[in-house]
Amino acid sequence: MAHVPEPAFIVLNSASYRNKIKNIVELACEANRFFPQSAAMEVFQEMLPQIQFNSMDWQLTTIQLITLFVPTAKLPADMPAVSSGPQSTDIKRWLPTIFSLWSFNLRISVFDAYLMNLVTTLIVEQHGQFQLNCEQIQFVFASGLHLLNLPVSRSNIPLPRSVSMALADTTGYYRMLHGGALPLREERAHTFARFIVYTLSNDSASGSLELFEQLVQMIEPFFHPSNNGAWSSMLARLLRYLAKELLSRSRIEAAEGCKVPEAARLERKVRRRFVVSVRALAMLLLFSKDEGSVSLSHSTLKHLAELEPDLIFRPLLDTLYTAIDSVTETHRMLSAMRALAKLATNLSNFAHYPEGAQHIAPLLILTLPGIDVNDSAKAYFALSFISSLCHNGVVLDELPVSGDMPAVRSMSKASADEVDEEEPPEVDMEQIEWLTRASTGQFETWIDQFLRRVFVLMDNLSSGQDTNSDANSSDMRLGSKASQTTELVLLHCGSRYYPMITRLITNFATSITSLSAVDNMCELVSGFARAIPEHALASLLPICCERIREEIENGVGQTSSLSRVTHAHSETTLVWFASMLAALTQAQDGRQLLPYREQIISTVELLVDSCMSRHVYTVGSKILYQILSWPTRTVPVCGRSWSDSMWNDAKFRDNHFRYWGQHPDIADKDFSISWHIPTREEVDFVLELMQRIVEPRIDELAQRISTLTDSHEPSNAENVALHRVLTVLRMGIRGLGNLVPPPSAPIATGNLADELVAGDDASNMPAWYLLDRPVIAGYVFTDPNAAEYGQVVALRKRTGEIAARALGELGGRDTGNVENIKALIQLAESMICHHAIDRDTFSRLRRGWDQGMDAFSLDTRQSIMPRLFAIRRATLTQISRQLHNMRFMPVTQLNRDISTNIAQLCLSAYAEVRNYAVGALENIMALQPHIKPDLVPMFLAELDAGEHSDAEKMMGALRVMDSGPMRRVFLRDWRLFPKLALALCRAQHEDKPQVKKMVRNTAVTQVVQSSAPLRPEPPAPHVKQLIDALSTEDLSAAAELRQKECFDRYEFAASEHTKLMSQLVDILRDAGTTWRFAAIAGYYLDQLISVRLVPEPQLAKTVAEYLTSDLILFRERSALNLSQILGIIRKRSKDSYNDINVVNRCRELPLNGGRAMSGQQPYTELCARALEGDTDAKKAPFLDDPACGWLVWPETAKVYDQPPADDILAYNHIDEVSRPAYDAVREELFADGKWDEIARLFSVEGTRSPEEELFGSARAVMFCQAFSLFGYPLLERAWSAIEKLARENDRVGAQRAASEMVGGLLRGSKHWARASLDAMWERLIPLLDNVFAHVGPDTLQFWQVCLQFAFARRDPRRYLPLIRMLMYSRPFDPHAEAPFAEAVKLELLRVLLSLWDWRIASAIIDSRPRLLDALAHPYKQVRDVTGTIMYMLSSSEFCVSYANATEAIDDLARYGPLGRDFSHWAGTQRTQKLIAEMTQRVSAWEADHIPSNEGTSNYSRGSKTLLVFFYTGFRYGPRRLALEHARQILALLSELQEQHDDEEVWRVASAILQFLSQVLYTTELAELVATQFLSLLASSKWHIVNKTLPLLCTLTFANRFTLSQEIRARILDTISQYLEHDQIEVRQAASVSLTTLVKCASSQVISEINTRFSAKLFKRLPRKRHGRAPPKDPAAYNRLVLTRHAGVLGLSCLVLAFPYTVPDWMPEVLVLLAECIDDPNPIQSTVQRTFSEFRRTHMDAWHEDRKKFSSDQLEILTDMLVSPCYYA
């Protein structure tokens, strides 16, 4: 499953490969629930042999695969449990294996996250049938705490850069994803939160509630606003997920048919305790500095409020009232506004939280000042709060109140801070209802003030009329939000307020300010008209009509103007009232408009007939469109949150607050949605408008178009008149779309699937409308034989014909009449793309719908939702049907003419015209995809125009071809794709930079999404069986027909692919092709080379030729392409011939627990035995998998037999169809002088500096492919070039190129015969010996990476001659006079060890490398590499090697629920002796050490090597050895960190101690480490004690869930004792450490600390008075000062440990501290600092915290916190 392919087979495109892998991963994630429990054993048998944790190389992928495929679903009830055997279903059998793997990589967050996700998913999917034990839960909690990465007493110590990295990452050599990792999503905060929630249990002893409460206590300070940092986002997300998952679990367990057993369901008292803990953190996060964290806190509170509203709203409302009322702290007010907007639906739900209803009116009044034009964010959230209330059904109407407020009944739980774990506190419903009724009396005042504030807001916001206004600006969004909110308020207010509302809005709307406010005014008026249409029309429509008539009669609007920006000042009044009339008629059905029929018609006629100003007649056309459109629409009537029958019910009106938040089911009768169905009167009204206004414009357009064909140039007045006709006619035609359905034609299902489902709007279309037929969509006329039907159809047809003719006439003329051409394009587009609806309108409505659903956390599938959303959904459904029907319009000749003419305008010389035309054509092509193939030749011709090309036309053609609808045509249709690719590659005749940029962008877009044809595979037999089982009819004939169509399509595509590749090669070879366009051709070739298609010989030859191109870009692309081609030839040859040598040398071998490889000898010694000449070891087959056998031996493995003694090529047979390409490449690579040219060009240094030159793995892979395929003969051709490069020791580029060639040679010789290998080694060993002897600092890295590339995932016995040369021919001499040469030997040895690890460690040890003699070597690099190699050698001796997976699983389960602890290991006797010897030598040198800044003593050098040894383990290697031994030399490390004469020593020593304190330990090891840290405190050197205290604090915090209570108490007690240390620095360090530990302590421990340190203050100091003698006993006096200082420090720790809360014991502690203010320093300064910190941290919530103090305590506290005044 996890076998890694050879580089030869990796020919996949990276983007395509990533997408495919992502899809497979997502499929596996979804399919996991269907895996049987018995599959777990199978997964472990496959994956455990892939684990080798000595190196992290490839291991992340293995862990990901385990988490992906281990089944987590519950065992079906009808399936018997199997506890043993290969089909075992017992989770407890294999779960210890997971924890054992976890222990390998403790404190590596990425492994923690994936393994935690597996355990969490297992718990969730078991539905309460399986629970972890306490040990396992504590283990996961400890890992989760480390995932949070909180900074606790840690210091970032800059480390020396010289420490070498000990591990290698070889995934890059295989063109895999980064690090070889799968694209598997892992949200660490979500995983940890799910684990916490789903391990909650009613039994406190077995669940995670107490652990979670302890975690909350520890991390609470990190949530405060003043404590912001990199950890804030993780903590905020954790909090949100905790609340979300708790809500999810509660809903699941409360649902009918819940699968969770009753005993495993969460009791309410447990849930309420959990909610209280999460609430405390969310309240702190409420006013964070980070907006994202604030938003997450609101989501947290919302989820919690849905579960336990009384626990959330009681403390939250007090905080919000105070914050909103704050004037000086704007950030708190803004956050409070946002919180109200988020929680409005929960707060106003009377059935869910009755007490919230009485707060609605006060909060509305309190938030009213937030509607402020000077603060758009605050205004937006204030409006959001109001709109959320209205959506939730809040009715803004005064209710009757009877009598006085009822007396308050005594309640058992009345305090907001008092938590009832059994049930919510009792509430007095009678009192609540009275208070709610009384609060509604404020609604009338509030509505008046609200409207006035909205008027001010709208009057001062910018709008679309402003020239510098952006339609997406914050002002525009705020204006839209204000108008929507106003509409909701008017919909939900009582009718008694209608006269007041009408008066206010009428006064505002008729008070003309400036045209900058017209858009905002119109939105407001439109909302007024939709909410209260009778009052709005009656008060405003007659005024508008009268003022419009007056202005026009006075000559306003008669000046001819086509300007869209400027307008005459005299037109302000006319435009204002015309716009208001448009707003009044928007969304109004005919029933409201019919009483004003004549007024409306006459006004519209005046606007479109008499006015010549573009502003005016455009508004008139808009009014025409709305009057034609809305009365004929079949749409839901804009309604309230309650149905009309319910709204008019007296019972509801008198008690509406009881219904707030109660949304009936869609199926209930109370939910009924009213629909507007056009009446006959409305239809007659529309037909009259059509006859009086629209039809005459058609004749006028025809007449004006005919006059434009004359030779004279039209005047400005004629242009304006034409533009007016086009505008009026376009809006008129759009308005008639609801009268008749669009013409339909049958459509093939295949075409529908190809175009409709994948079209632009497919993702926005409801799935149930992806049908192959039109649907009923509520058109007025549906009978084609009806007279009205024919009349409307004829009108549309005639308009279309005239528009098509006008496009041909006007568009073909070289004229600057741009505005009319644009208007004509819009008219023509409307004929096809607008029939009752258009794509843009649908997309806009859909986006609004999606945003609303997200804001209210709704799902389209749920049947209970706010009625306003249901109305929106019904509206969206209706227009979806209309848009769906438009897709069935036939492609008539008229549509083709219009499309062709618009396409011609896409090539216009005017940019504005092109932009309009391209947009129109995109819409047309999206709705009528069959038009696209007819238009392609026109645009391709512009790219192929050669020297006669026009840059403007090329830009238009490129824009169209890069558009979404056209791009899909080229990518899917192999009839067109080659044409575009070739046209782009040949479009070099235009020199304009903008054209070149567009050509490149279009090509890149095509290249990224293109791919070679994929041969269809016939369905597997089990698929056919499944289809037959699911189908009721025989589908075999249809399936065969469809299969034949697929194969025919593939054959055609493959044929075109072959032709295209040939033509691209011709372009590439053409000397006239510039490098930019040759590069485009190369990009296409890269993408289209496929392992499934035969490589073209001409392509192969060209690619091989371009290896020696003068352009580095071509050389790099050729190396990649040639690598792919050679890989294809190799794969096809192996697939074609079963007797090919390369296949015969590979087989599957039963390993028998490793004995098949090494007999009775350990496998770890196989390489050492081979080096010694052991015949059996040398003859054993090669096993390349580096992980095989380290943890578990697989049943069988892929092995390679020893190469034969003959000299026959591995690829002795070449696939016949690939033979021409093979011969072409061979001819080129074997040509005389070819390799000399390759060497010359590949060794050319680029623009990088020598430090930036990098080993080219892509080039090395190409060499590997070539040497693998062509064998030793190719080496004979290339050898002279390789040798020449390798001997140029001083040239960086030559060494880099030589290393790439040698790396490819070493890796490519994998399948060579023995004679060829011997000849290769005979040449190569002397050359490499010379290279390594003269390698320099700049070139060493190349040869290191070269060896890594060659050795990666290879059996070391393949390279015995090279290993022998590195270990024996060039032994390390610690006393040599050339230290760099010795460092090179060690560096190369380190490469061997990093790649082969446990398989070569014994061989290196047997070679006796004399590493210990270099312990105090004078050369720094030698020491660093020595320390690294010694650690790697020691840790590489560790391997488990279970015989099989079953044995491993059973053995690991034997160790207990957590499995076997692999986190630490003492090492072999050799390792223990080595570490002891190093330590002894360093200790012996210490006696002779003389401090010196130069650090030249043996003690300093030996210490550095020893430190590097351990640092390698912590930073780069497996840590198990370092964890075991570093703790045993803590005393030495503490001494070394005090060696300040050598900076490197103390820095690395401090870093190791930091690592030791931060690592997550298992329970047993954690206590050992803690004990050894405690022993350091016995040191007589106070500096060591001072630095050990913070480390002990960090250790305790990091291992809070693994350390026992006894050891934590001991640590706490020990640190407390150091508060009385003689050295003040130690006391201060102990104080800081104790403060951190108190955060993790229980209430009982805190009480004991309080008692202990308070007792130290009972004995007071004798007062010193002036003139008195000093104390009789100074020592006793000083001891008393020290004791009292310890007491003050201890109590100060208690205060500072709770910086944002006031526990019950804190007031007395503060009073006690205040009594010590007159004591001498350092007591006085400690008290002052404590109160200063207390004041700073409690400032935000002091209004609440002060309630915890008595009046006397407050008086004392005030004296301490308030600075004295000089003038007091």
Image (cartoon, rainbow, N blue to C red):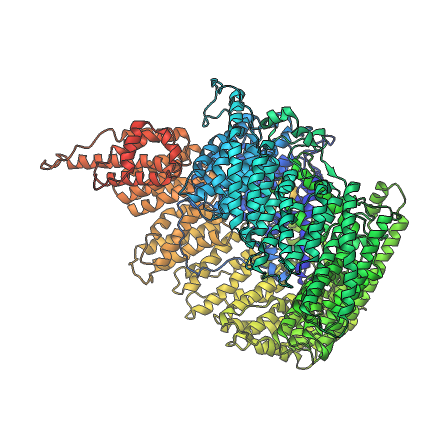
Residue 1182 horizontal/vertical position (percent): 66, 58
Q: Quadrant of the C terminus?
A: top left
Horizontal side, residue 513 vs residue 938: left or right: left
Instruction: Identify which residue, 263 or 88, lies in the foreground.
Output: 263
> Which quadrant holds residue 170?
bottom right
Horizontal side, residue 1538 vs residue 623: left or right: left
Determine the residue located farthest toward the front in the rendered image: 554
Number of callouts = 0
Q: Residue at x 60, y 75 (%)?
A: 1242
Residue 1456 seen from this side: no
Instruction: Identify which residue, 190 or 1753, lies in the foreground.
Output: 1753
Residue 42 horizontal/vertical position (percent): 69, 43
Residue 124 seen from this side: yes
Instruction: Identify which residue, 603 or 1038, lies in the foreground.
Output: 603
Instruction: Identify which residue, 1134 or 396, lies in the foreground.
Output: 396
Compared to residue 1618, the image places residue 1088 above or below, namely below
Compared to residue 1327, the image places residue 1574 above or below, namely above
Q: Residue at x 57, y 63 (%)?
A: 1348
Residue 201 horizontal/vertical position (percent): 56, 29
Residue 1270 horizontal/vertical position (percent): 71, 71
Compared to residue 353, the image places residue 1697 above or below, namely below
Horizontal side, residue 829 vs residue 576: left or right: right
> Which quadrant holds residue 905?
bottom right
